[in-house]
Structures are given as C-alpha cells and as structure tokens.
Image (cartoon, helix red, strand yellow):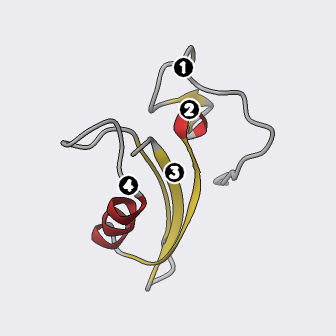
Amino acid sequence: AAPRSAIGVSATGEILLVAVHHSPLGPGPTLDQLAQIMLQLGSADALNLDGGSSASLYLGGRLINRSPRTAARVSNSIGLFLQ
C-alpha cells in the first residue's frame, strides 16, 4: 500500500481528481481499495495514476495534501483550469 492518485468520471460527466494518502489500516490504499474509493465517490470509470511521493494535489496554486518538503518533483501532470 502507498499513497495513490486517480482520475475518474461519474455517470453524469463529473470529473473526479483524487489523492489518497492514509487509510485506517496503513500508509495508503491498495489498488483494490482505491477502486472501491472511486466507486464510493461515484466514479463510473477511473484510471490509477502515479503513487508514492508524487501523488500530489494542488488547488489554487497550493499543494493541499502533503508537505512541500515530502512531495516529489514530477515532470508531467494533469491540470484543470476553471474560467
């Protein structure tokens, strides 16, 4: 188990961007647990992205799910920009 990130879409077209770092049983979910989390959030389709120290979530230009000191430097990402 490790921190994980995923992207999904609901049956109504809502986009879900998810980063999970801790579970009640350990440091992060297994892939099966991540699939269950995505289903619980209403995802009809989902894609597992990267995990570990690169599983980061930014909102409004701020890293919101971990300390900047523990976040890995990544070469590419998925971004959504609201107008």
For the residue marked with disc 3, what is the amino acid? Ser
Residue farthest to the left?
Answer: 24
- Badges 3 and 1: C-beta atoms under 8 Å apart? no
- Horizontal relation, residue 39 to residue 48: left or right: left
Task: Check disc 2 and give the amino acid type.
Answer: Ser
Residue bearing the label numbered 2 = 53
Q: Say above or below: 36 vs 75.
A: below
Q: Give the distance between the C-alpha atoms of the residues marked 2 and 3, in whole angstroms.
A: 10 Å
Q: Is residue 80 above or below residue 26?
A: below
Q: Residue at x 74, y 35 (%)?
A: 74
Q: Are marks 2 and 1 in contact (CB under 8 Å)?
A: yes
Q: How far separated are the C-alphas under marks 4 and 3?
A: 11 Å
Residue underneath mark 4: 30
Label placed on residue 70: 1
Locate residue 49, reporting x and y percent. 60, 56
Residue kind at label 4, given as amino acid type: Thr
Which one is nearer the viewer's eye here, 42 or 52? 52
Crowd rating for badge 4 (residues with CA inside 10 Å; few <14, some 14–19, many 20+)? some
Q: Are marks 2 and 3 in contact (CB under 8 Å)?
A: no
Sequence-wise, the earlier of marks 3 and 1 is 3
Q: Secondary structure at mark 3?
A: strand
Residue lying furthest right: 75
Q: Secondary structure at mark 1?
A: loop
- 41 left or right, relative to 47: left
Name the residue at 78% across, 45% down: 76
Cα distance between the residues tagged 4 and 1? 20 Å
Residue sitting nearer the eye, 21 or 57 = 21
Q: Could you tell me how far apart the alpha carbons at marks 2 and 4 are, in whole angstroms?
A: 15 Å
